[in-house]
Image (spheres, rainbow, N blue to C red):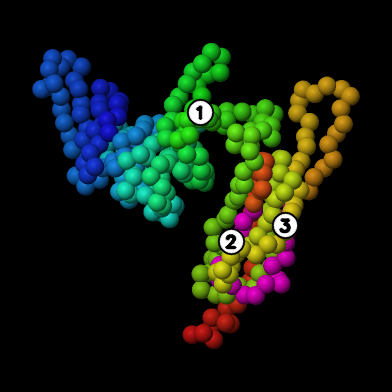
Amino acid sequence: AIVAYYQNRIIVFKKRRIFQVTIPADMTTAADWTIELISNSIGCVAEATAVQVNSDIFFLSDDGIRSLIRSAADDFTSVGLPISEVVKDVIQSINTAAIGVCTAHFYDNRYLLAFPSEANDVNDTILVYNTVLQAFEGTWTPNVMQFALTNFQDEGARLMLKTTTGQINKYSGYKTPAQVTSADYQDAGVDYESYVRTKDFNFGDPFSAKYGSHFEVILDDSYSTDASISIQRDIDVGDIDVQPNLNISSAALTLPFTLPAILPTSVKKRLASDLRAYEKWRLLNIKITSAANKMAIRQITAAANPDTIEVQKSI
């Protein structure tokens, strides 16, 4: 891959090496170019994944998503640690036999990486990294083979996604909450399921078994009328439904609005469930699923009491 960089520089990615080419402003031939080796062991395995992200360059390497970091004084460039280490299971699901079709784009302060998972030979998953929050936001499953930035008429810059079926989809993250409708949460007019699963809660103690107390889910403005909450402990084979078939939709008046208007009824935004009815466990994760439409989650919290006596007995 070749990526244009700052001050007449070009970053050249090989599979196992990275070079920086500096082109002097007064150069007369290519012989005047200066070539520097940045890394002798790390490179880019899919050329379309190397894109400039603010002052850095993100790319997909053998061991995950890495970044080429520019020093504050701009006197050297180095390769950072894999930022995808926290989602290593997702990176390991990439089909290495078809890794060359991976592609990426930087838009809306997000690095979007499309890749083929498992036995697929076309991109079927998108992994999204938020550069402002410095956190991964999740995975999505459109079959995107190419990203493109358009700038038609008064719309401004918009990210388009070309799928393997020939469809052109548009990233709608630019819309305000007042502009969003339920149709924005459909795929070509068809509803799709979405879910959020927390990491495993160990409550600061990875060894002790716990007696569950309760957990609480705080929801933001949502459209979903069919949501469910489930839990999974380390002793469970699958998910355990706790609160199925929930209507979490909420209505709101957005300024400006025309009088007369009816104020919407308040909808419960905080859902709590008791965990005391379940057996002891070490780890617990919580999953919130929506069969269709918008589901917005603000916060998930849980409480439990460790059984330290059980640990002493086991020892």
Question: Tag 2 or tag 1, which sits nearer the N-term?
Answer: 1
Residue occupying the point 58% across, 61% down: 285
Indicate the secondary structure of the residue bearing disc 2.
Answer: strand
Q: Residue under label 1, please give it.
A: 168
Using residue 103 as the reference point, say whether residue 269 is left or right of it: right
Residue occupying the point 60% across, 50% down: 195
Q: Does 284 lie within the magenta span? A: yes
Residue occupying the point 57% across, 30% down: 172
Depth check, mark 1 against mark 2: the one in front is 1
Question: Tag 3 or tag 2, which sits nearer the N-term?
Answer: 3
**Crowd class of label 2 (few under 14; some 14 to 19; many from 20; radius 10 Å):** some
Q: Residue under label 2, please give it.
A: 285
Indicate the secondary structure of the residue bearing disc 1.
Answer: strand
Kindly tell me whether residue 173 is visible in this rendering: yes
Confirm or deny contact between disc 1 and disc 2 (CB under 8 A). no
Question: Tag 1 or tag 3, which sits nearer the N-term?
Answer: 1
Residue occupying the point 67% across, 33% down: 183
Kind of residue sitting beneath label 2: Asn
Kind of residue sitting beneath label 3: Pro
Kindly tell me whether residue 203 is visible in this rendering: no
Measuring from the top left, give residue 4's x and y in whole percent: 29, 26
Quarter of the picture containing the N terminus is: top left
User: Furthest residue to the right?
Assistant: 260
Using residue 301 as the reference point, say whether residue 169 is left or right of it: left
Q: Residue under label 3, please give it.
A: 244
Give the quarter of the image for residue 10. top left
Mark drawn on residue 302: none
Kind of residue sitting beneath label 1: Ile
Depth check, mark 2 against mark 3: the one in front is 3
**Which segment is the magenta one?**
269-288
